[in-house]
Image: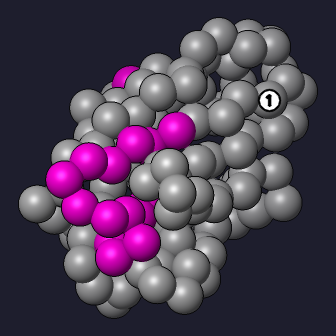
Amino acid sequence: QVQLVESGGGLVQAGGSLRLSCAASGRTVNNYAVGWFRQAPGKEREFVAAITRILGSTYYADSVKGRFTISRDNAKNTVYLQMNDLRPEDAAVYYCAAKTVNSGVITNRYDYWGQGTQVTVSS
């Protein structure tokens, strides 16, 4: 199985940028579909972005399209989420997740989850 560790969260002003990292260990991340999700206080966890296994097709929630970019570095066994033009409504705990199939990558049906990293956006 794969273990996932997120990092890169923090406090940023509105309009700023952050890059989140999801480091995988135990298995090659290229063999997994990886998704980023977020959960704000009092809200359900929601899909943010995903990258499919092998081919690396990407998917985004409408709310982040054009501002966030998901990418994968196979040499570093890491998936990134570059977040630009951050807004207060982007504040949440961000989680990465992985699964071995490409189906349903925009749903929360993933097999492996990281512990999350906090993103705070000040207005």
Asked whether the viewer can see residue 52, the reply is yes
Residue placed most toward the observer, 22 or 61: 22
Tell me: residue 1, above or below residue 100. Answer: above
Where is residue 78 shown, x and y percent of the image?
Answer: 48, 50
Task: Find residue 121 and report its image quarter.
Answer: top right
Q: Which residues are magenta?
A: 21-41
Q: Residue at x 32, y 65 (%)?
A: 28
> What residue sits right under mark 1 in the picture?
17
Residue 27 painted magenta: yes
Mark 1 residue crowding within 10 angstroms, few (<14) / some (14–19) / many (20+): some
Where is residue 15 shown, x and y percent of the image?
Answer: 88, 27
Residue placed most toward the observer, 21 or 89: 21
Tell me: residue 87, above or below residue 27. Answer: above
Asked whether the viewer can see residue 43, the reply is no
Where is residue 65 shown, x and y percent of the image?
Answer: 76, 62
Residue 54 painted magenta: no
Where is residue 92 shown, x and y percent of the image?
Answer: 49, 29
Tell me: residue 68, above or below residue 121. Answer: below
Number of dots carrying numbers: 1
82 relative position to 91: left or right: right
Q: Residue furthest front?
A: 75
86 relative position to 55: left or right: right
Task: Find residue 17 and report its image quarter.
Answer: top right
Colour scheme shown: one colour
Give the residue type that dot 1 points to. Ser
Tag 1 secondary structure: loop
Q: Residue at x 59, y 14 (%)?
A: 10
Q: Residue at x 50, y 49 (%)?
A: 76
